[in-house]
Image (spheres, helix red, strand yellow):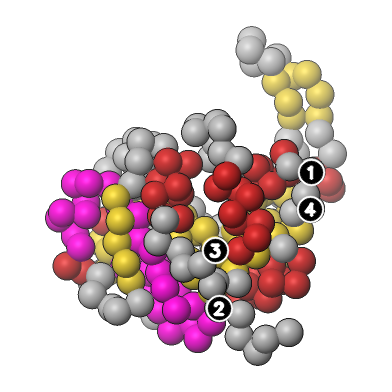
Amino acid sequence: MTDKPKTQVIIVAGGKSIRAKTDKLFFKIKDKHILEITVSKFINIPEIDKIILVLSKENKEKYSYLFKNPKIKITEGGDTRMLSLINGSKLIDKDVQVVMVHDGARPFVSENLIKKLIYYAYEKGCAIPGIKLKDTVKEIDANLSVVKTLNRENLVSVQTPQCYSMELFEKLIGNITDFNLTDDSQIIEKLNLPVYVVEGEETNLKITTPIDFKIAEVLYEEKN
């Protein structure tokens, strides 16, 4: 096995932030925008030689100046996550061994988790981070009536970065038919190929709703 699998990451950051009620990616915590914090987590990892940042057209025009590191390439996103992923995939080099896909709104992913996923995907083909659920989970119907209680011991909450060998990533991109999917690894599942779960991190928060900004401020203070 190579010492350092050549890895490139697509950071998907083209969303509309509807639930956050503000442009969460460019919300400032202290002196940094959330997306700047996210990107910084990948800059100094030796295995990663390119970061593909997928922005909305408006944010590409407005904020590209913030991302001047030579590792970073910026492209325009689509109307959905899958379309943005397809756009980002066009900048992946053909000799890459591992491709990562990360949410721009997850600014606290650790270097340890990133590296663990890179090497696991290099060996196994596909690795995603997941954490065990704390709450009891119930399935409901359209009338909000409980159908059944699920066994949480067999359930995980999935995070990013999701990580693929180049071979599997090409299969993923080539088999996108539902452009409204919110999880990339689902496509690998549908191909009946194994998706392996690596233990994620509770601090690998996805900023989605207004309360998450408060949590993010606390985490940023603790880590800096």
Q: Which numbered disc flags the more N-terminal residue, 3 or 1? A: 3
Magenta stretch: includes residue 38 = yes
Specify the amino acid type for callout 2.
Lys
x then y, percent, for residue 23: 27, 47
Magenta stretch: includes residue 125 = no
Labels 2 & 3 near each other (Cβ < 8 A) = no
- Which residue bears the numbered disc 3? 100
The mark tally for this picture is 4
Q: Is residue 202 visible?
A: no
3D distance between C-alphas at marks 3 and 1: 20 Å
Figure quadrant of the N terminus: bottom right
Q: Which mark is residue 16?
A: none
Closer to the observer: label 2 or label 3?
A: 2
* Apparent side of residue 62 relative to residue 111 in the rendered image (left or right): left
Q: Which numbered disc flags the more N-terminal residue, 1 or 2? A: 2
3D distance between C-alphas at marks 2 and 4: 22 Å
Which residue lies at the image location 46% right of the left edge and 68% below the top edge? 93
**Range shown magenta:** 35-64
Q: Is residue 47 above or below residue 92?
A: below
Q: Which mark is residue 194?
A: 4
Labels 2 & 4 near each other (Cβ < 8 A) = no
